[in-house]
């Protein structure tokens, strides 16, 4: 009888953990190469909400991992601890690659001793190896994006508390929180046939909604970035590209820097917003490129010599009230971001409305968009 009461008590505490435990810090492990992450390549995400400027990802295409990797479960890709999968990949590549990790302000990127085309193909294989589908890819801009895959990061014993952690040891139950991740990779060619590689993470979390009464539903909403997971994947990418795993860890740790960059939002020509960077033009170009990665901007084209980005954004088409009741039509428009150095260490970033209609809605949007860029620093 006593044993039965204890079991019920443990169950109550464990179920309570499923709803109340959400300490984000508890999900993270600070040791590079030791984090255990599971992505489910056939998990279909419904009601996936994404920010307005992003294209809603398709959830119909699931990856047949057997096309790329042998001896793997078809519906589950596991990143084992202690680099076991990474070492297998590095054995395939054989040839060591010199890779540097550079960090400036909020930016961290790789300088790889390989040509951009080689890095491009290896990066595609890297994401496919881990169960992702490449949803968008443009060699013209050097950008590739994956689909969203669901993972279930396990909550640490520290966050669970003593009773629930003891119960987990006895029952082997895992406490997890539903999260979906996607990655964006940008490759920039540099001198001596080398490449700069930038990796950024976007995450969604599943939340419970109440439609009224007893009806409940779950939807996916954007959540703040997990920088430790992003660093972990950057480390794994370094190994895939041919770096030694011990050197890769040392380089990532040594590259940590806490300097902050202050970016001002100001009023520009025609009332449109502009940004002011305390950097040279090339440094600003790199910073803006990184910020566009972080916000998931749809870059149609870019020209480093001209100092410009051409960016697409989606908006609902202006229609009559009657037609809005029956259909929703989204149109794609474009605008230009121009980077110009105005002093020795002062560079300004301008918003150029390509329609030249000077609508107040677009002027307001320029402050929203450039403001989002400034928030990344």
Image: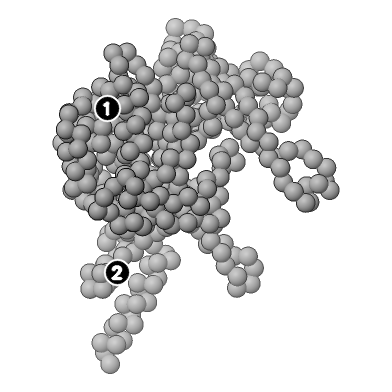
For the C terminus, which image quadrant? Answer: top left
The residue that label 2 is drawn on is 173
Residue 230, quarter of picture: top left
Can you give x and y, in whole percent of width and height, for residue 85 in the image?
Answer: 22, 46
Q: Distance between the residues labelled 2 and 1?
A: 38 Å
For the N terminus, which image quadrant? Answer: bottom left
- How many numbered badges does the structure rendering display? 2
The residue that label 1 is drawn on is 101
Q: Which of 67 and 175 is in front in this view?
A: 67
Q: Which of 331 and 233 is in front in this view?
A: 331
- Asked if residue 147 is positioned above or below residue 345 in the image, the reply reads below
Whichever of labels 2 and 1 marks the residue nearer the N terminus, that label is: 1
Q: Which of 140 and 236 is in front in this view?
A: 140
What number is the disc on residue 154? none
Can you give x and y, in whole percent of width and height, for residue 356 in the image?
Answer: 72, 19
> On the rendered structure, is 107 left or right of 311?
left
Residue 330 in view:
yes
Residue found at x 74% / y 48%: 327
Q: Which of 166 and 186 is in front in this view?
A: 186
> On the rendered structure, is 265 left or right of 32?
right
Q: Could you tell me which secondary element the residue under label 1 belongs to?
A: strand
Residue found at x 38% / y 26%: 187
Please tell me how crowded label 2 is: few (under 14), some (14-19), or many (20+) other residues with Cα within 10 Å: few
Please tell me how crowded label 1 is: few (under 14), some (14-19), or many (20+) other residues with Cα within 10 Å: many
Q: Tell me if label 2 and label 1 are in contact, CB under 8 Å.
A: no
Q: Could you tell me which secondary element the residue under label 2 belongs to?
A: loop
Residue found at x 68% / y 40%: 330
> On the rendered structure, is 213 left or right of 7?
right
- Asked if residue 13 is positioned above or below residue 231 in the image, the reply reads below
């Amino acid at each position: 009888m006593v044993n039965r009461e204890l079991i019920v008590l443990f169950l109550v505490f464990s179920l309570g953990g499923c709803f109340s435990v959400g300490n984000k810090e508890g999900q993270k492990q600070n040791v590079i190469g030791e984090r255990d992450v599971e992505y489910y390549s056939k998990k279909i995400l419904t009601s996936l909400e994404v920010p307005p400027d992003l294209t809603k990802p398709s959830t119909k295409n699931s990856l047949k991992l057997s096309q790329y990797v042998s001896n793997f479960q078809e519906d589950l890709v596991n990143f084992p601890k202690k680099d076991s999968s990474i070492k297998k990949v590095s054995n395939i590549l054989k040839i060591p690659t010199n890779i540097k990790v550079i960090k400036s302000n909020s930016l961290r990127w790789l300088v790889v001793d390989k040509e951009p085309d080689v890095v491009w193909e290896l990066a595609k294989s890297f994401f496919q190896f881990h169960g992702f589908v490449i949803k968008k890819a443009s060699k013209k801009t050097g950008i590739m994006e994956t689909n969203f895959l669901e993972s279930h990061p396990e909550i640490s014993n520290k966050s669970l508390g003593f009773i629930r952690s003891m119960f987990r040891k006895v029952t082997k139950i895992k406490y997890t929180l539903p999260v979906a991740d996607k990655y964006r990779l940008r490759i920039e060619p540099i001198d001596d046939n080398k490449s700069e590689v930038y990796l950024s993470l976007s995450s969604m979390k599943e939340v419970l909604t109440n439609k009224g009464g007893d009806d409940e539903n779950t939807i996916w909403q954007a959540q703040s970035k997990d920088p430790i997971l992003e660093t972990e994947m950057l480390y794994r990418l370094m190994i895939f590209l041919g770096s030694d795993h011990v050197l890769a860890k040392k380089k990532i740790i040594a590259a940590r820097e806490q300097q902050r960059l202050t970016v001002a939002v100001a009023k520009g020509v025609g009332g449109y917003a502009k940004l002011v960077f305390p950097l040279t033009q090339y440094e600003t170009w790199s910073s803006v490129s990184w910020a566009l990665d972080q916000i998931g901007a749809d870059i149609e084209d870019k020209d480093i010599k001209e100092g410009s980005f051409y960016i697409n954004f989606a908006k609902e088409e202006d229609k009559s009230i009657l037609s809005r009741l029956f259909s929703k039509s989204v149109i794609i428009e474009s605008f230009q971001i121009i980077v110009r150095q105005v002093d020795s260490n002062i560079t300004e970033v301008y918003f150029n409305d390509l329609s030249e209609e000077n609508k107040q809605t677009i002027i307001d949007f320029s402050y929203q968009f450039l403001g989002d860029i400034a928030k990344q620093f």
